[in-house]
Image: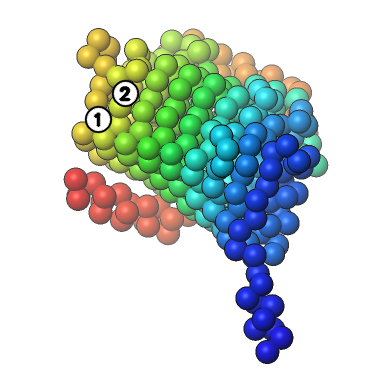
Amino acid sequence: MLDERREEFVPREKVIKGENCSDLQKELEAALATGCETVVMDGEFRAVDKEQFALLRVGQDKKIKIVGRNNATFDGEGVAHILYVSKGASVEISGVEFKNGSTANLNSVLSNDNHPQEPLNRYHYLDGGAVLVGEGAQVTFNQCGFSNNTAQICGGAISNMGGYLNIEECIFDGNSCGDTGAAIDNLVDGSLMVVKKSKFVNNRANTIGGGNYGAVTVFPGTFAVIDGCDFTGEDETAIDWTKGAEVSFEGNTLNPDVEEPVIENPVHSRRSGIETIKRYALVLANRYKYLKKLQGVPKVLGAVKKKHRQIYEELAGSE
């Protein structure tokens, strides 16, 4: 009887206030440990530790719902990722602004202490200015904003590395990256992203080279459904995808003044490739003992890719 009463008192919601929060990661882990299902983020949260991998990390196979209140904002302060969602985790986020996430300084903060204790690859450090989505993770953003985030290489705001990324009624404004996917990069083989009723404004790819990439990049072996989105605020390419990608691009509004708003099989410029290699070399030189064992672009398990393909075919077929 006592055990039944205890179950009744498991907290279903926890409120975390930005003004009183010195360690957001610790607060989140405490909430998860109690069985809490929903965390309400109230106010502004900033990356105060310039040697942290991310402002917030959701561990492997964890499940949480995050709801923003009172202009909830995650500010990376230009020094770190904002959110890292680990392999197999499930996260739903609504009403939160993600701003100033950056991978520009991560080459100087790699150590065994400040990164998630799980297998990583070099793209975890270089890509996904605001958000990294891990293999088999399921991440949903609803009515969120992504602004002024930047990645050294790919995915200015978000890099999808094998997860199921679901975005609806969000705004991507002023994000940038050195190479592909100024706002979103669907990178790893088997990744699935679904983007609906969202707006893209002034996002910039190719800042280190002359490739012709867009606000959204879809790589070979990945799946993307882009439906009902507004790209009229983009004065450069809206979306690009490469042969081998499976893309459903329907009902979107493009800027009529852009010469090539949609590009299939974009050209990877020689300059972009050289600059990318230089950046890898810089990172390796600074923290070689940590990065030498890291993998390149990984491939997700076959079961995950099969599942994502089935979801893609169902969604693309229903349009």
Q: Which image quadrant is residue 269 in? A: top left
Give the total of numbered labels.
2
Estimate how packed mark 1 is, as few (under 14), some (14 to 19) or many (20 or more) residues with alpha carbons within 10 Å.
some
| Nearer the observer, 185 or 1 | 1
- Residue 308, percent from left and from top: 37, 52
Q: Which residue is mark 2?
A: 231
Q: Is residue 28 visible?
A: yes
Question: Which residue occupies 31% across, 56% down?
Answer: 310
| Nearer the observer, 259 or 4 | 4
Secondary structure of residue under mark 2: strand
Identity, as a three-letter code, of the amino acid under mark 2: Phe
Q: Which residue is mark 1?
A: 252
- Residue 251, percent from left and from top: 21, 34
| Nearer the observer, 48 or 43 | 43
- Residue 109, percent from left and from top: 76, 29
In the figure, is residue 9 to the left or right of 108? left
Q: Is residue 180 visible?
A: no
The C terminus appears in which quarter of the rendering? top left
Identity, as a three-letter code, of the amino acid under mark 1: Asn
In the figure, is residue 42 to the left or right of 52? left
Question: Which residue occupies 54% across, 47% down?
Answer: 67
The N terminus appears in which quarter of the rendering? bottom right
Q: Are marks 2 and 1 in contact (CB under 8 Å)?
A: yes
Q: Calculate the distance from the C-alpha at mark 2 to the C-alpha at mark 1.
A: 7 Å
Question: Which residue occupies 38% across, 25% down?
Answer: 200
In the figure, is residue 63 to the left or right of 106? left
Q: Earlier in the sequence, mark 2 or mark 1?
A: 2
Q: Residue furthest bottom?
A: 1
Secondary structure of residue under mark 1: loop
Estimate how packed mark 2 is, as few (under 14), some (14 to 19) or many (20 or more) residues with alpha carbons within 10 Å.
many
In this rendering, is residue 127 above or below 118?
Answer: above
- Residue 132, percent from left and from top: 56, 39
